[in-house]
Every structure is written in structure tokens, then in C-alpha cells.
Image: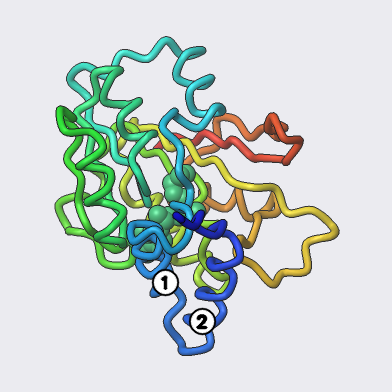
């Protein structure tokens, strides 16, 4: 008789707490994806379609990425990156987790996306200021608040002159006890990308299909 894997959320909380207590606030991502790969829990952040607010944004802008470079930060299983690649962008997508990157690549065998294992806190120098479109979905909020400023500045540094950053994050509500993960963002926190050489174009609060509040923010350099 086959047993169903447990849901990943509880395991995420457990692994994150252990990892953070050990002084390693990002170690749990690989452990969680590995547990998903082995079937111990369901695969975390598993979706095959672009995040709806991103898809809506690219549709509204009628984007043609031909001749432009895009990067997806903390790309997980690759759905947002695949979406940008179908719009014609030369797309790089990176994640700290080797298992996430291996899974994204193997799920998309014909992909043109350049999937890389890389840490936001130590990116290749040649990526600095070199992407016309930077997409960041739920990565900053997945990091504890004491890393927020570093994470926001590292994401901002990827944007080329004249380029665009789209950031999609959960909205921090009054009932959030701060225990995380995730650690949703206040309006000031989502707006803080503008402190790193970027200019705010739009900052909107939306509702997901399940009623959760999300920021979608757009900046340019
Ligand atoms: C909440 S998940 C979101 C994944 C994906 N963006 C999505 O929306 O489905 C956060 C992702 O960020 C990655 N991540 C966390 N810290 C990172 C870092 N320092 N550098 C690169 N990726 C990181 C994790 O491995 C994980 O895939």
C-alpha cells in the first residue's frame, strides 16, 4: 500500500526553525526541496503556471522580450522563468537549492532558460546592472527580517539602467506574529527597493484567488 506524502508546509516551518536556530537562515530550502524530491513531503511551491499577478502584468504590458535579458530570483521550480522565456526574453533563473534547479531543468527539457545554482548574497559580478527585467516572486519574504535590507539591495543591483524590477510579495497584516516563514512585507518594506537606485513606477495591493493580500511593485533604474 502506497502512503501519501505529507504536506510540505509543516515541514517548512520545522526545517526553517531548526536552520535559523543553527544560524543558517537559508539552509532549509535545499532540505525542503530534497524532502519533496524523495517523496517524504509534497514538493514545496509547486506550480507550473506563472504567478497570476506576473502573468497579468506581462499581458497588460504586451511584453516582447526579444533582444532583452531577464532574470528570475529564487526561481524555485521555474514556472515564472519559463513564462518569461516564452515571451522572448533571454532568461536566466537562479536558486540557492540545487534540487530546485535540477527539478526545474528536468521538468522543462526543451527550455531555453539558463538555470543556475546561485546565492543572492554572492552573485556573479557580471550579473550586476545587467538585466532588462528582474522578477522576484516570494523570495525576499522567505528570508528572516534581519536579512531584508541585504536581500532587497542584492535584487535591486541586478537591474540594468533603464531596466525594470517586478516584485511580488505577501502583504504583512496586523495578525502576523512575525514567527515566519514567510515574513510578509509592510508597504515601507516593499517600497524600500527604491532606496537602492531604483524609482517606483507602481505599487499595488491585490488579492489572490484564495483571498491572500499580495504586493505587486514595479521599479525602474
Ligand atoms: C518561497 S520560495 C518561492 C519560489 C518561487 N519564486 C515561486 O514563487 O514559486 C523562495 C525561493 O527562494 C530561494 N532562495 C532563498 N534564499 C535564496 C538565496 N539567498 N539565493 C537564491 N535563492 C534563494 C529558495 O530556495 C526558494 O526556491
Q: Is residue 36 above or below residue 104?
A: below
Q: Is residue 33 left or right of residue 45?
A: left
Task: Find numbered disc 2 in the image and state the secondary structure of the residue it sits on.
Answer: helix
Label 1 CB, ligand 1: below 8 Å? yes
Q: How many marks?
A: 2
Q: Earlier in the sequence, mark 1 or mark 2?
A: 2
Residue that lies at the very extreme toward the bottom in this rendered image: 22
Residue name at image x 42 percent, y 65 percent: 32
- How busy is the neighbourhood of tag 1: few (under 14 within 10 Å), some, or many (20 plus)? some
Q: CA distance from mark 1 to mark 2?
A: 8 Å
Determine which of the numbered discs, if any, sits on residue 26 in the image.
Answer: 1
Instruction: Answer with the quadrant where ligand 1 appears in the image.
Output: bottom left
Residue that lies at the very extreme toward the right in this rendered image: 174
69 or 26, which is in the foreground?
26
Q: Is residue 182 left or right of residue 207?
A: left
Q: Is residue 177 above or below residue 42?
A: below
Residue 139 visible to an observer of this rendering: no
Task: Find numbered disc 1 in the image and state the secondary structure of the residue it sits on.
Answer: loop
Residue 99, horizontal then vertical, whole percent: 27, 58
Q: Which residue is mark 2?
A: 20
Colouring of the image: rainbow
Q: Is residue 211 above or below residue 77?
A: above
Residue that lies at the very extreme toward the front in this rendered image: 1
Q: Is residue 29 above or below residue 89?
A: below
- Which quadrant of the view contains residue 78? top left
Residue 6 visible to an observer of this rendering: yes
Residue 65, horizontal then vertical, whole percent: 27, 19
196 or 49, which is in the foreground?
49
Quadrant in the picture for the C terminus: top left
- How busy is the neighbourhood of tag 2: few (under 14 within 10 Å), some, or many (20 plus)? some
Residue name at image x 16 percent, y 33 percent: 109
Amino acid at each position: 500500500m502506497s502512503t501519501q506524502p505529507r504536506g510540505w508546509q509543516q515541514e517548512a516551518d520545522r526545517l526553517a526553525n531548526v536552520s535559523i536556530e543553527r544560524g543558517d537562515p537559508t539552509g532549509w530550502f535545499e532540505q525542503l526541496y530534497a524532502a519533496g524530491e524523495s517523496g517524504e513531503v509534497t514538493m514545496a511551491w509547486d506550480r507550473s503556471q506563472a504567478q497570476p499577478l506576473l502573468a497579468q502584468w506581462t499581458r497588460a504590458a504586451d511584453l516582447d522580450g526579444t533582444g532583452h535579458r531577464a532574470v528570475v530570483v529564487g526561481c524555485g521550480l521555474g514556472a515564472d522563468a519559463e513564462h518569461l522565456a516564452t515571451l522572448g526574453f533571454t532568461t536566466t533563473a537562479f536558486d540557492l537549492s540545487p534540487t530546485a534547479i535540477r527539478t526545474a531543468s528536468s521538468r522543462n527539457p526543451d527550455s531555453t532558460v539558463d538555470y543556475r545554482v546561485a546565492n543572492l548574497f554572492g552573485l556573479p559580478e557580471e550579473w550586476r546592472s545587467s538585466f532588462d527585467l528582474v522578477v522576484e516572486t516570494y523570495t525576499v519574504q522567505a528570508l528572516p527580517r534581519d536579512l531584508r535590507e541585504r536581500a532587497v539591495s542584492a535584487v535591486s543591483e541586478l537591474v540594468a539602467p533603464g531596466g525594470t524590477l517586478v516584485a511580488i510579495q505577501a502583504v504583512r497584516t496586523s495578525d502576523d506574529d512575525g514567527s515566519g516563514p514567510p515574513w510578509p512585507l509592510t508597504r515601507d518594506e516593499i517600497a524600500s527597493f527604491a532606496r537602492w537606485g531604483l524609482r517606483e513606477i507602481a505599487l499595488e495591493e491585490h488579492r489572490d484567488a484564495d483571498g491572500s493580500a499580495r504586493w505587486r511593485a514595479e521599479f525602474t533604474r
